Amino acid sequence: MTLTASRPQFLTVAEAATLLNVSDRTIRRWIEAGKVPYLKLPGGGYRIPQAQLLASLSGTYDLRREMEALDERFADVTENQVRAALAAADNK
């Protein structure tokens, strides 16, 4: 989940909830209240722009800095390597 990708990263409601360690319902309430940015899909689902979601947070904890550190740490890992590692783990 690269923070600074060549294209914007959009999260599902479930992915945003997992990222922030809250329930799907909490994310949906925040969407309904206009507290987080979102795109509404024609089918009724939502996509949340990751960078804007993180920017919408406030407080003293710098999640953005932590996400950027993880991006740097794993910058050389390709999607194919991740898929291969997941497939190998499934076969154990």
Image (cartoon, helix red, strand yellow):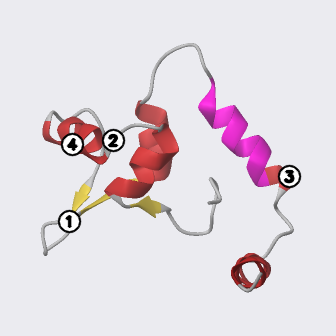
Q: Earlier in the sequence, mark 1 or mark 3?
A: 1
Q: Are marks 1 and 4 in contact (CB under 8 Å)?
A: no
Look at the image and give the residue range highlighted in magenta.
Answer: 62-71
Q: Is residue 49 above or below residue 21?
A: below
Q: In terms of image quadrants, where is residue 47? A: bottom left
Classify 27 as above or below 33. Answer: below
State if disc 4 and disc 2 touch (CB < 8 Å).
Answer: no
Label of residue 45 in the image = 1
Residue 42, placed above or below residue 52? below
Residue nearest the observer in this picture, 49 or 26: 26
- Label 2, label 3: how far apart the Cα atoms are: 28 Å
Q: Residue 76 vs residue 18: left or right?
A: right
CA gap, disc 1 and disc 4: 11 Å
The quarter of the displayed image where residue 77 is located:
bottom right
Task: Give residue 31's mark.
Answer: 4
Which three-letter amino acid code belongs to the residue tagged 1?
Gly
Please report whichever mark, 1 or 2, sits nearer to the chain's N-terminal start.
Answer: 2
